[in-house]
Image (cartoon, rainbow, N blue to C red):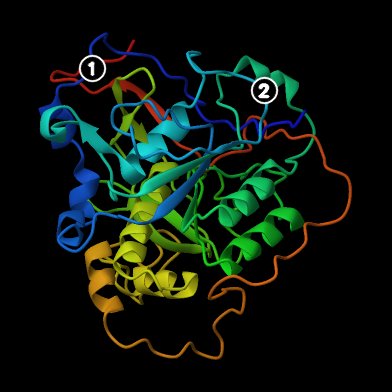
Amino acid sequence: MRRALAALLLAAGLAAAGARPASADIIRAQEWGLDALNVREAWRTTRGAGVTVAVLDTGVDATHPDLRGRVLPGKDLVGFGAERGDRSWARHGTAMAGIVAGRGHGPGNGDGVVGVAPEARILPVRVILEEGDPARSRARGGRGSALAEGIRWAADHGADVINLSLGDDSATAHPDPGEDAAVRHALAKGAVVVASAGNGGEHGDRVSYPAAYPGVIAVTAVDRAGGRAAFSTRRWYSAVAAPGVDVVIADPDRRYYAGWGTSAAAAFVSGAAALLRSAHPGLSPSRVRELLVSTARGGPPGGRDDAVGAGVVDPAAAIARASTPQTRLRAEDPPFFGPGPHRPSPPPAGRRRPLAWGAGAAGAVLLLAAVILRPRRRPTP
């Protein structure tokens, strides 16, 4: 039986502050991330049609009203733990999928969460367990191979963008040869790889993997004012930033919560990459990264820093710039980006290890605030 990466997904717990879901007006009014990314301007060109975004996470609720009809048959590389109907099933993955490609629901799609690329397809790949899953105690050993297998599987099954709203930023975090090779395989197949930079900004800014692998678009989090979120990891690999505070997220329980974390920021950028790929299908992963970085808004003096990378992504600006002639890559540009399919790189030799990312090992994942969005907020217990 394959073991799961037991990520610390809901370290702060998830307590409902009320029994009824938010009204449609409240939900839409609080989706400030769409405005921050200027997505409505991008929607004048595309809403993500024809693009597949793989969400490597805890699973995705394909029956959620905001995602119905957008979720493809996926892969479960965990093989045990919570199942549909359990409280600790597919919460984080459903939240990320909603940010990427939620399409709302109800008459005229007037209710629910609308994602950055609402016409994109979601390819779910289950590679981690929720924090609240009782089966986490069965996962043991090192990080194992589920994430590397998931990246390869997604790339081999049509993913145009791979969203990794997860990570290991524990004190013992280190690069894994299998994961690194899987990222290179995905890039060579033409898939854009996006990962959360980490939530260790107040705890030492430790390096997080997979964000630190070459070729990955690592995403930091900003607040409504465009400033770096205090929890967001500051590291050399930071490429761009996106909303990560008070983000509206969907849940399998059919309620909507406020969440925070670089996980949410990564999902926003995966949606932006999907819009760019939809408008310009021939773009290579390196060109997608270049466009998102060069058109980011609100960047720091000098063009980038470790806190927000080049600034907040603007998919509309990236789409517009992609129409201009492409400049030749500079000689110093890294060689790990691939323009399209080639011979897959073999997985590393050796025995597979059991899988377990324990407490403290997944600082890049989303932490959900203990609040249900509703017309009138009440303090949490």
Q: Tell me: 165 left or right of 5.
A: left
Of the numbered discs 2 and 1, the one sitting upstream in the chain is: 1
Q: Is residue 334 above or below residue 96?
A: below
- Hey, what amino acid is under mark 1? Pro
Mark 2 or 1, which is nearer the eye? 2
Locate residue 142, reporting x and y percent: 77, 38
Q: Mark 2 sits on what residue?
A: 80
Q: Which residue carries the number 1 mark? A: 21
Q: Amino acid at mark 2?
A: Phe
Task: Name which residue lies at 59% across and 61% down.
Answer: 186
Identity of the residue drawn at 20% across and 43% down: 32
- Which residue does the image show at 41% across and 64% down from the upper left? 309
Q: Name the one closer to the observer, 172 or 230.
A: 172
Quadrant where the C terminus is found in the figure: top left
Query: From what the image shows, is residue 178 above or below residue 262?
Result: below
Task: Pinpoint residue 208: horizontal percent, then vertical percent.
Answer: 59, 51
Position in image of residue 148 (x %, y %):
68, 49
Label 2 Cα neighbours within 10 Å, binned few <14 / some 14-19 / many ≥20: some
Residue at image location 75% in from the left, 41% down from the top: 144
Gap between marks 2 and 1 measured at Cα: 30 Å
